[in-house]
Image: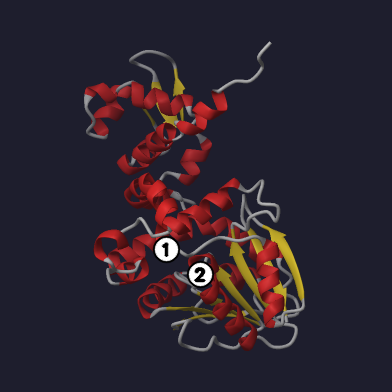
Amino acid sequence: MDTLSPARIMEVGLAFWPAKVLLSAVELGLFTKLGAGSMTGRELQLALDLHPRANPDFFDTLVALRFLERDGDGPEARYRNTPETALFLDRNSPRFIGGFLEMANARLYGFWGALTEGLRTGRPQNEIKHTGAPVFAELYSKPERLEQFMDAMSGISAGNFQAFAEKFDFSRYNTLCDVGGATGQLSMFVAGRHPHIRCISADLPEATRIAEQKIAAAGLADRVTAISLDFFSDPLPKADVITMGMILHDWNLEKKMHLIRAAYDALPAGGAFVVIETLIDDARRENAFGLMMSLNMLIEFGDAFDYTAADFFGWCREVGFSKTEVIPLAGPASAGVAYK
């Protein structure tokens, strides 16, 4: 008897169906509109300005995918958020991560349609294809888009940065520099958890302005400083711990090595260099998210790529670091640590 089934093939092959249902719901602000309340399909359709054809198929699909709960059946049934969508996809929640999904919907969803071309050519498939401008140059030239991008990244990074602040042993260190610190989020988590640590969040001037506002609003300006830095042309500030959250994977091997050497040069003996990434498992068999993130780097940059802990440790030892370790964080992410 044939026990093989094509179900898994079909599930993955059509995975863009549930992805787009969720992304469109986020784009429409459906979860924010529901908030802590409930609505009938007709009320929700009118509130979101949708065509009658969307009701009830769209809402019931979200129920079947476990992104909405429904009380009752038929036209008078009422839809409400699940505990997860209320926490992570209602814009009024402090743990909102929808900004990243909005960015994925507006940018990545279309770009990934050209993955085959990227695999054949090794070239980026994002805005660069049309404008010729590098993606970061494009982002940093438009303050409103930069802030949206940084908020999106903050939403998905918060769990990892918080876990790092809790799990890493800061007892023998006094200073930290977060390179490519964006909004200053990692520095603020560490400073909030460890009152003896002084932090520097370093990024380009446009990002530094945003970070200064966020740090002041958090009441941490006495222990977290935002400074302007071009990490490819400026030496890194001296610190006991140097962190890079989702930075190293943005670059090719030559630039990765430049950043690792720069971190080594800025650290004292015993200092720690930490990368926070979706580190791929060493055998490259398990962390599908990390592997797909590496394909996303192909889409975004062409020659950029994600890597395993073994890759990272090999590069660090080549530069002179001696001891290494991995600290699992939230979900598929980890901290790779190299000690000088």
Quadrant containing the N terminus is top right
Q: Tell me residue 55's x, y (percent).
A: 30, 22
Q: Residue at x 46, y 73 (%)?
A: 215
Helix, strand or loop at mark 1? helix
Find the distance from the CA under tag 1 to the CA under tag 2.
Answer: 9 Å
Q: Are marks 1 and 2 in contact (CB under 8 Å)?
A: yes
Quadrant placement of the C terminus: bottom right
Few, some or many residues within 10 Å of mark 1 (<14, 14–19, 20+)? many
Which residue is labeled 1 in the image? 301
State left or right for residue 231 relative to residue 132: right
Residue that lies at the very extreme toward the right in this rendered image = 323
Is 210 situated above or below 117?
A: below
User: Is residue 108 toward the left or the right of residue 285 in the image?
Assistant: left
Which of the labelled discs sits on residue 268, or is there none? none
Q: Could you say where residue 323 lies in the image, as x and y percent from the top left?
A: 78, 74
Q: Is residue 302 visible?
A: yes
| Local SS, label 2 | loop
The image shows residue 32, relative to residue 246, as above or below, that is: above
Q: Looking at the image, which is closer to me, 311 or 335? A: 311
Quarter of the image where one finds residue 242: bottom right
Q: Position of residue 211 (x, y in %)?
A: 43, 73
Vertical arrangement, residue 133 with respect to residue 6, above or below: below
Whether residue 92 appears in this view of the structure is: no
Circle 2 packing at 10 Å, graded few (<14), some (14-19), many (20+), is some
Residue type beneath disc 1? Phe
Q: Residue at x 48, y 88 (%)?
A: 234
User: Can you tell which mark lies on residue 252?
Assistant: 2
N-terminal of the pair, mark 1 or mark 2, is 2
